[in-house]
Amino acid sequence: MALTLHGTRTNNTDVLTPDFPGAIIQIVQGIKTDTFSTSANLATKATVTGLSASITPTSATNKILVVLSLMGGADRDSTYGGTILRDSTEIGIADASGSRTRNTFGMGIVADSNGVAQARDWNTGNISCSVLDSPTTTSAITYSIKIGGNGSSTVTVNFDERNTNGATDTNIASSSITLYEVVAS
Amino acid sequence: MSIGRQILKINPNAKFSINAEDVNQITWLEGTTPISISDIEAQAGAVELEKALENLRVKRNQLLSETDYLALSDQTMADNMKTYRQELRDLTTGLDTVAKVNAVTFPTKP
């Protein structure tokens, strides 16, 4: 049986770059291993320092699969949301709906129970989010993350806000953004 | 550390972001007037005490909830249980340092 390889041979070498739809031809990851926090609200949001990744698509028709994995927390009851940005453009955001803030991802953090402190500031959650983006460019692009909360709480990345050194149940983690260049056609 | 809380104790309306929990990596947002590092750091003790008390209350509240059913109207609570629950409620009285909080001994459940 004949075996057909779909790809592009570059520079007359034996390296074959797949060119069939769905092939992943480039992967880049940005990982944040330190912490971040902000009191910005959902409407204004703050850029998460160090949680970004850059990629240069090999073809303007290719797509970029953006996969975000983020540990978030808050020091009080709070909404928690944010956007993924391609350079300065928000991607994968919700449809417009009144004056609601449009985000790419979100969650709610309940730190109290009926107004009584139960777990409070060590509430965290993991956000897993993916967007298949069509940047239509072969120039370098950078994907980054903005987050915000309810404006009266501090929302965090990679730690529970209690963050007590020496406590066996204080939780720290890492967050990442991974970019896959996918052949579209 | 909890720099965010320390800032919010000084200015509850402050808008900021902090990278790596580093006082030298604070970005002030939305026109918030910057607060000096020394003023922020001066709040560290108060915030640590606040957190220690919160942790204590969480454990105390859990212990209280374990015996809440004994306070239902169709139950008769024994005196030693009343004493135990009152000791739990009084546990935070006079705790004004982290060392005192850490030295707290919980009463023994009857």
Image: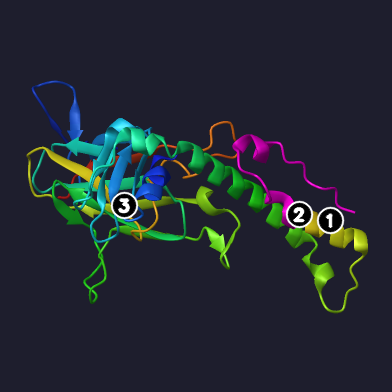
Closer to the camera in the image, A147 or B102:
B102
Point out the stretch of residues depicted in magenta: B88-110
Question: Label 2 to label 3, Cα distance in Å?
Answer: 47 Å
Closer to the camera in the image, B82 or A120:
B82
Quadrant of the rendering where the N terminus of chain A is positioned: top left
Label 1 neighbour load within 10 Å: few <14, some 14-19, many 20+: some
Question: Label 1 to label 3, Cα distance in Å?
Answer: 52 Å
Residue denoted by label 3: A130
Question: Label 2 to label 1, Cα distance in Å?
Answer: 6 Å
- Helix, strand or loop at label 3? It is strand
Closer to the camera in the image, B97 or B30:
B97
Q: Chain of mark 2?
A: B
Q: Amino acid at mark 1?
A: Tyr
* Corner quadrant of residue A32: top left
* Labels 2 & 1 near each other (Cβ < 8 A): yes
In the rendered image of this protein, does residue A14 appear above or below residue A23?
A: above
Q: Report the residue at 54% width, 46% height from top.
A: B50
Q: Chain of mark 3?
A: A
Label 2 neighbour load within 10 Å: few <14, some 14-19, many 20+: many
Residue denoted by label 2: B88
- Helix, strand or loop at label 2? It is helix
**Visible in this render: residue A155?**
no
Q: Amino acid at mark 3?
A: Ser
**Visible in this render: residue B51?**
yes
- Is residue A153 magenta-colored? no
Q: Report the residue at 38% width, 40% height from top.
A: A175
Q: Amino acid at mark 2?
A: Leu
- Residue A101 x, y percent position in the rendering: 26, 66
In the rendered image of this protein, does residue A15 appear above or below residue A158?
A: above
Circle number at residue B84: 1
